[in-house]
Image (spheres, rainbow, N blue to C red):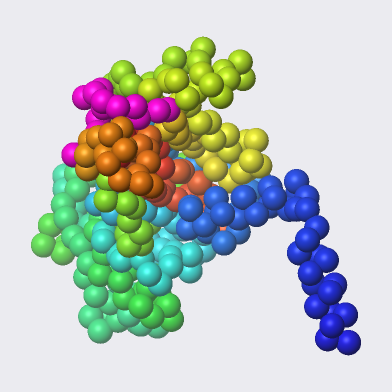
Amino acid sequence: MPGTVLLLLLLALARPVSPENRRAEALKKLLEVFGMEDPPPPPAHVKQPPQYMVDLFNTVANADGVTKNPDVLEGNTVRSFLERTHGEKMRFLFVLSSVAKNEKILTAELHLFRLWPRATEGPRRHHFCQVSVYQILDKSEPDSPEGRKLLATRLLSLQGSGWEVFAITQAVRDWTQDESSNRGLLVTVHGLGGTALEAPAVQFASSGDHHESKKPMLVLFTDDGRRGASLPVAGLPASQPQDLPAKLTGPRSTRSLDRLQPCQRHPLSVDFEEIGWSGWIISPRGYNAYHCKGACPFPLGENMRPTNHATVQSIINALKLSEGVSSPCCVPDKLYSINLLYFDDDENVVLKQYDDMVAGSCGCH
């Protein structure tokens, strides 16, 4: 019986891999590159990402997702959470279950949209107010000193409208360490020195009564510790003189022509729609990863960006000074990161930066 099982196993292993299985295996490997086990499901309904996240993506990356401003993000992940509890006004609760345990919390912000003040009869007695944000420690007594902890406070003009941002990093660190401690946030509005104001002096948009674009939002900056190779990483330069002309990269190119071409960078398109990921990836729709191909003939010129080791190896190979020494290889010598803006499993919008995803230039190494 064991012999029969072994025979069946060997026969199964000997079967050629079907195109469907090969595609599934390739997509699984690609997901691993993006730090995921399974692709998130597309949102159940058409959703617009928060404008803040779209603007942040456009600041950090170009249209293809390649990083253009590498110093903007402190870490490699930005998560946004909309307030969905529709609870009491001036109390806000965010579900942070999608934050991974290995993510280091760097900065957390509460984004509240301030509504235009309602018209009042006669002149206002106050022109400024004090807005404070508290971490709720005890739901039953959030107004008592023991039931809350002050996180941020500042003065706001009673005139105007727009987004207000408050730092709440310590509260989020507490919540990610102990999920049961997340009892939400309380926002209070008082006059200068804590005096009472004519209600309502300042109002913020709530999750239940206002448009999706004005919902309260928690923005979390983290780092998951993932790092790429030690090759130089930089923002994308304006031009790439080393690129191979497109007419030499098409199907008419022959293998012999490829061998004659010096080491250069060739296009390598990654299309998320073709892969089947366009339902959850917001931006980009795809990107050019590029790949390196070509010969590294002796003598190596400066245009081939050889290392000293590659130069020595090329000389040894050309002069046949040692058996088994091949010519240097055409490989990436500069790598760029890309950025993905996508919906996660909980339909939160995430901006994530991935190192070493684009061959920036090629050299003989």
Report the front residue among 211 and 54.
Answer: 54
**Vertical comparison of 93 with 233: above or below:** below
Quarter location, residue 104: bottom left
* Position of residue 202 measured from the top left corner of the image (x, y, whole percent): 30, 50
Region of the chain picked out in magenta, as a range: 294-308
Residue drawn at the location 31% of the way across and 75% of the way down: 174
Q: Is residue 213 left or right of residue 71?
A: right
Find out whether residue 295 is within the magenta segment: yes
- The answer to whether residue 120 is seen in the rendering is no
**Vertical comparison of 148 with 284: above or below:** below
Residue drawn at the location 28% of the way across and 34% of the way down: 319
Q: Main secondary structure of the magenta part?
A: loop
Quarter location, residue 320: top left
* Position of residue 178 measured from the top left corner of the image (x, y, whole percent): 38, 80
Q: Is residue 128 left or right of residue 23?
A: left
Q: Quadrant of the N terminus?
A: bottom right
**Vertical comparison of 85 with 68: above or below:** below
* Position of residue 145 measured from the top left corner of the image (x, y, whole percent): 23, 80
Find out whether residue 140 is within the magenta segment: no
